[in-house]
Image (spheres, rainbow, N blue to C red):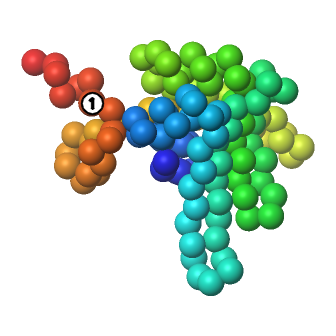
């Protein structure tokens, strides 16, 4: 699972195996270690308590939650992504995007389990 942060937006991209795991369990977790005892854990989980995507950051853990119905539809169909905006107390919205990860067209990204890129098949 890839995490991209840019400005006030975050994006998760999941390969086929991660989407399959998420479809079964409603949960996928990844982490990055910066130093001993210094890591960031990021989690995608489905929740029956929400209707739009939301992110919660607490104790070096970024938890992105999406509604169960949207999660199931995304994971089991050709739907590419789920997006939403989360209102923040300062008035700025946080943009959230969860996508299926496609194979890179320029060869930099070598993830054998990425989804076939639909642009590859255009003639």
Q: Residue furthest bottom?
A: 36
Residue 103 seen in the current view? yes
Give residue 67's quadrant in the image.
Answer: top right
The residue at the point 77 percent across, 54 percent down is 57
| Res 101 seen here | no
Q: Quadrant of the C terminus?
A: top left
- Numbered marks: total: 1
- Residue 115 image-quadrant placement: top left
Query: Are there few (<14), some (14-19), or many (20+) residues within 10 Å of tag 1?
Result: some
Location of residue 57 with respect to 79 vertically, above or below: below
Where's residue 32, x and y in %? 55, 66
Q: Which of 45 and 13 is in front in this view?
A: 45
Q: Nearer the viewer, residue 23 or 92?
A: 23
Specify whether 33 is left or right of 117.
right
Q: Where is residue 23 in the image (x, y as percent from the top left)?
A: 56, 28
Q: Which residue is drawn at 57% across and 76% down?
A: 34
x and y, in percent, of residue 61 in the image: 72, 58
Q: Mark 1 points at which residue?
A: 116
User: Considering only vertical position in the picture, is 110 above or below 15?
Assistant: below
User: Mark 1 falls on what kind of element?
Assistant: loop
Relative to the observer, which residue lies in front, 10 or 110? 110
Name the residue furthest left: 123
Left or right of 10? Residue 78 is: left
Q: In which quarter of the image is residue 31?
A: bottom right
- Residue found at x 42% / y 39%: 17
Residue at the far front in the pictured view: 24
Residue at image location 78% in from the left, 41% down from the top: 92
């Amino acid at each position: 699972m890839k995490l991209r942060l840019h400005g006030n937006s975050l994006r998760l991209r999941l390969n086929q195996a991660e989407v399959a795991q998420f479809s079964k369990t409603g949960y996928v977790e990844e982490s990055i270690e910066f130093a001993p005892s210094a890591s960031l854990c990021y989690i995608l989980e489905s929740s029956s308590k929400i209707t739009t995507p939301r992110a919660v950051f607490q104790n070096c853990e970024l938890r992105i939650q999406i509604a169960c119905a949207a999660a199931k539809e995304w994971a089991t169909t050709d739907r590419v992504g789920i997006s939403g905006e989360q209102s923040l107390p300062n008035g700025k919205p946080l943009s959230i995007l969860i996508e299926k990860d496609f194979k890179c067209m320029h060869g930099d990204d070598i993830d054998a389990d990425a989804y076939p890129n639909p642009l590859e098949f255009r003639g």
